[in-house]
Amino acid sequence: MGQEEKPGDYLTEKLEILEKLIANTETQSRFIHKREMRGLRRILREREALLGKLLAVNNQLTMDQGWKNNKQLMSLQQAIADRQAQLLKHSSQVITQAATERTRIAAELNSSRMAKNLQNRYANPWATVSQGSRLNAKG
């Protein structure tokens, strides 16, 4: 019985970590739309820590493969598989959103650079000189 409880605890912990990762991914999506880089960096650091925990749990589970055929843990295994699929789906959506937002930001920067370039290079510099002022002012 002791061997069955330990893998069950690890599977439960894995499910909890996956739930946190899904919530983290949804938060990333909100930060991407708001363009809040500081918050996004914090969320990514949290995600990295969660992935480290998930890796540790997976290493513990791979040491003992006997739990895979346990019928009592099948529902937990199915829940984990569902959450992993959901996490992959959300993560791919967030990556797509981030790429789209990056393209949008690049286009905005490019248009503002073009406008500044146009204003600096092609605007008539003599138009700002008021009538009657001296071109070669002293001192």
Image (tube, rainbow, N blue to C red):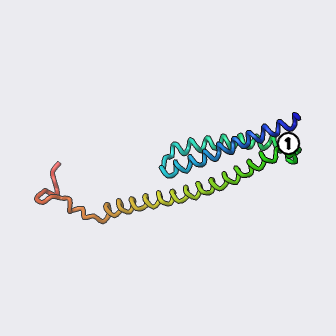
- From this view, report whether residue 91 is shown above or below residue 53: below
Q: Residue at x 74, y 48 (%)?
A: 79
Q: In the figure, residue 129 lies in which quadrant?
A: bottom left
Q: Nearer the viewer, residue 63 or 18?
A: 18
- Image quarter where the N terminus lies is top right
Determine the secondary structure under disc 1. Answer: helix
Q: Residue at x 13, y 56 (%)?
A: 134
Give the x, y percent position of residue 127: 20, 62
Please name the amino acid that badge 1 sits on.
Met
Q: Is residue 64 left or right of residue 33?
A: right
Q: In the figure, residue 5 lies in which quadrant?
A: top right
Q: How many marks?
A: 1
Give the x, y percent position of residue 122: 30, 66
Q: Residue at x 78, y 44 (%)?
A: 58
Q: Residue at x 33, y 64 (%)?
A: 118
The residue labelled by disc 1 is: 63
Q: Is residue 18 left or right of residue 100?
A: right
Q: Nearer the viewer, residue 71 or 3?
A: 71
Residues packed near mark 1 inside 10 Å, few (<14), some (14 to 19) or many (20 plus): few
